[in-house]
Image: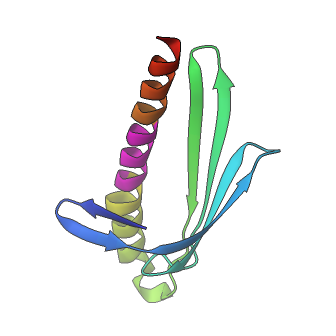
Amino acid sequence: MAAVRSGIPIKWTSEQIIDRDRVEIHFHHLKAFSKGMQVVWTFDQRPDGVLVTIVHDLHFRIPALAPIAEPIIGDFFTHNVANKTLRCMRDYVEAKANRVAA
């Protein structure tokens, strides 16, 4: 996977598991600075749409650097990329729904 944050390219490898019964997507980051991070996306149908919740569980591999690395990886990169991904997914799904409804 790849993204760009403030002009900085980011690349990582993750395993994705779709749990249709629980309506969740699980990601396990396998390579890059986020190696070992577990991510769960949950989808909750609401009257006005779908609420998507993303939980990131990152424990930096070098404990001495964790106080510096975790806010950078989590706040600066991860949350930004997740928000962009959700916006793109919403726009795509809504555009498809509008085409079907027309």
Q: Answer with left or right where residue 70 lies relative to residue 55.
A: left
Q: Residue furthest right?
A: 21
Above or below, 2 relative to 18: below
* Main secondary structure found in the magenta portion: helix
Above or below, 60 relative to 41: below
Q: Answer with left or right where residue 45 lies relative to residue 74.
A: right
In-front residue for pair 70/3 = 3
Colour mapping used in the image: rainbow
Indicate the position of residue 56 as horizontal and vertical percent values.
Answer: 55, 59
Q: Residue furthest left?
A: 7
Above or below, 32 relative to 20: below
- Within the image, what quadrant is residue 68 found in? bottom left
Indicate the position of residue 27 as horizontal and vertical percent values.
Answer: 61, 64
Magenta region: 80-89
Residue at horizontal 44 percent and vertical 88 percent from the top: 64
Residue at horizontal 57 percent and vertical 37 percent from the top: 52
- Within the image, what quadrant is residue 39 found in? bottom right
Q: Is residue 81 magenta?
A: yes
Q: Is residue 51 magenta?
A: no
Residue at horizontal 58 percent and vertical 31 percent from the top: 51
Marker count (numbered): 0
Indicate the position of residue 97 as horizontal and vertical percent values.
Answer: 51, 22
- Within the image, what quadrant is residue 48 found in? top right
Indicate the position of residue 70 as horizontal and vertical percent values.
Answer: 42, 70
State the quadrant of the N terminus.
bottom left
